[in-house]
Image (cartoon, rainbow, N blue to C red):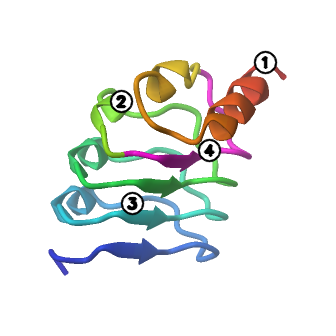
Amino acid sequence: LVCLRELDISHNAVKEMPESIGELEYLVHLIANNNDISQLPKSITSLRNLQHLDLSENRLKSLPAGLHHLHMLKDINFDGNSLSEPLQDLCRGKQLYPILCYLESANERD
């Protein structure tokens, strides 16, 4: 599994991700939308090849420090969570799809 490039665990009532997620160093796509995840393990910041991150429709209230170091991220979706911190820092300096950063920023203002 260490060479896994795509992981889709969406729609599975997952409550938490294991710390071992950070060992998937070749992971490019992490899709975990529509679950019950309330926090992310700190090890997620080790996924240096991650380009697509979909954690929409979960129960996230905060993100782990260091998530902004994932320089390969191009596509993120945190829609449908109750994040208490701004996502601008995560979007800044990356080649993320601009519309996603805009929508997420607008969501924070609501």
Instruction: Give, as a three-letter code, the residue at label 1.
Output: Arg
Residue type indicated by callout 3: Met
Could you tell me which residue is drawn at 30 percent across and 48 percent down?
44
Residue at numbered disc 2 = 68
Helix, strand or loop status at disc 1: helix
Q: Residue furthest bottom?
A: 1
Q: Which residue is mark 4?
A: 78
Q: Earlier in the sequence, mark 4 or mark 3?
A: 3
- Dot 4 crowding, Cα within 10 Å, few <14, some 14–19, many 20+: many
Q: Which residue is pictured at 30% across the width and 39% down the height?
A: 70
Q: Is residue 91 magenta?
A: no
Give, as a three-letter code, the residue at label 4.
Phe
Q: In the rendered structure, which disc, 1 or 4, sits on the residue that comes first in sequence?
A: 4
Helix, strand or loop status at disc 2: helix
Q: Which residue is mark 1?
A: 109
Displayed quadrant of residue 107? top right
Q: Is residue 8 left or right of residue 36?
A: left
The first of marks 1 and 3 along the sequence is 3
Whole-angstrom CA distance, mark 2 to mark 4, is 14 Å
Residue 42 vs 36, above or below: the answer is above
Q: Are marks 1 and 4 in contact (CB under 8 Å)?
A: no
Does residue 49 appear left or right of residue 55 in this picture? left
Q: Looking at the picture, how far across and down is residue 2, in whole percent?
A: 15, 75
Residue 17, disc: 3
Decide which of tag 2 and tag 3 comes sooner along the chain: 3
Q: Tell us which disc is closer to us: 4 or 3.
A: 4
Q: For the residue labelled by badge 3, is the local secondary structure a helix, a strand or a loop?
A: loop
Span highlighted in magenta in the image: 73-84
| Mark 2 or 4, nearer chain start | 2
Kindly identify the residue that appears in the image at 68 percent across and 33 percent down.
104
Where residue 34 appears, as percent x and y from the top left, is: 67, 64
Q: Position of residue 81 (x, y in %)?
A: 68, 42
